[in-house]
Amino acid sequence: MGDDAVCDYPGCNQVGEIISRLSPEGYLVATGKKAYSFREAYRRFHYCANHHEELMTGVWSRVRKPDDKKDGHVAPTAI
């Protein structure tokens, strides 16, 4: 990618080659600006491959909890 951003996961100094909208806590963080798209509405973070995988695993395990199986829950999309 060539922009050599550092991984945003606390304590990690690896190159953050993966851009994600997930915060290190695994949530979306609003930019606070008037936004016309999903991309503009949420902050961007950079992660190394290992920490990005760890975050995605955490999100999926949260989404898959039995108490989340009620109607009305939207499937997570690629962030």
Image (cartoon, rainbow, N blue to C red):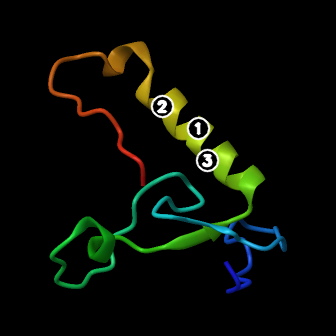
Q: CA distance from mark 1 to mark 2?
A: 6 Å
Quadrant including the C terminus: bottom left
- Indicate the amino acid at tag 1: Gly
- Which one is in front, 68 or 75? 75
What is the secondary structure assignment of the residue under circle 3?
Answer: helix
- Which one is in front, 65 or 56? 56
Horizontally, is 10 left or right of 13 in the view? left
- Indicate the amino acid at tag 2: Arg
Labelled pair 3, 1 in contact (Cβ < 8 Å): yes
Q: Quadrant of residue 18?
A: bottom right
Image disc number at residue 7: none
Residue highlighted by disc 2: 62
Horizontally, is 57 left or right of 7 in the view? left
Labelled pair 1, 2 in contact (Cβ < 8 Å): yes
Does 72 sit above or below residue 54? above
- Which one is in front, 54 or 4? 4
Where does residue 34 sit, x and y in percent of width and height?
16, 83
Mark toward the start of the polypeptide (2 vs 3): 3
Does 73 sit above or below residue 23? above
Where does residue 63 sit, x and y in percent of width and height?
42, 29
Horizontally, is 35 left or right of 79 in the view? left
Residue highlighted by disc 1: 58
